[in-house]
Amino acid sequence: QSQLAESGGGLVQPGGSLRLSCTPSGFTLNYYGIAWFRQAPGKEREGVSCISGNGGYTKYSDSVKDRFTISRDIAKNVVYLHMNSLKPEDTGVYSCAANNLAALVRQCHFRDWEYDYWGQGTQVTVSS
């Protein structure tokens, strides 16, 4: 059964950094669009970053632009979310999602209904 596993979350002070990993099992990343979503307590899930299936397009929400970077290592079959200059408002459960829809090959979006495969999520807490 295809699924995703996230790792790398934890407790970090404001201004600190974390690197999240998303590792699929049962399929390889080639031609799969991958997105990171987060959900804070009492708030709706929001898209944070995504990368297209061909790796040539990335997208960031305004709240994380210039602080977060998404990347992928095809050889290791992993997608990373590098998070710098973390703020308390970045706190939440971060989940990765994937799908190989044609619409996600050259672009990616934050439409959660486009993604069929989801991980369980990893908690990120930014606090002093």
Image (cartoon, rainbow, N blue to C red):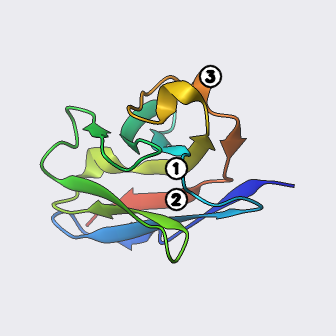
What's the amino acid at mark 1? Answer: Val
The residue tagged 1 is 93
* Pointer 3 residue: 113
Q: CA distance from mark 3 to mark 2?
A: 22 Å
Q: State yes or no: discs 2 and 1 in contact (Cβ < 8 Å).
A: yes
- Whether tag 3 and tag 1 are in contact, CB under 8 A, the answer is no
Mark 2 and mark 1: Cα distance apart in space: 4 Å
- Residue 84 on image: x %, y %: 20, 63
Residue 126 is situated, as x and y percent measured from the top left of the image, at 32, 60
Screen quadrant of the C terminus: bottom left
Marked residue nearer the N-terminal end (3 or 2): 3
Above or below residue 19? Residue 110 is above
Q: Which mark is in front, 3 or 2?
A: 3
Q: Is residue 43 visible?
A: no
Separation of residues labelled 3 and 1 (CA atoms): 18 Å
Looking at the rendered structure, the secondary structure element under dot 2 is strand
Amino acid of disc 2? Gln
Q: Which residue is mark 2?
A: 123
**Closer-to-camera residue (49/13):** 49
Front-most of 89 and 48?
48
The quarter of the image holding the N terminus is bottom right
Q: Position of residue 16 (x, y in %)?
A: 21, 70
User: Residue 104, image x and y in percent?
Assistant: 49, 32
Q: Amino acid at mark 3?
A: Trp
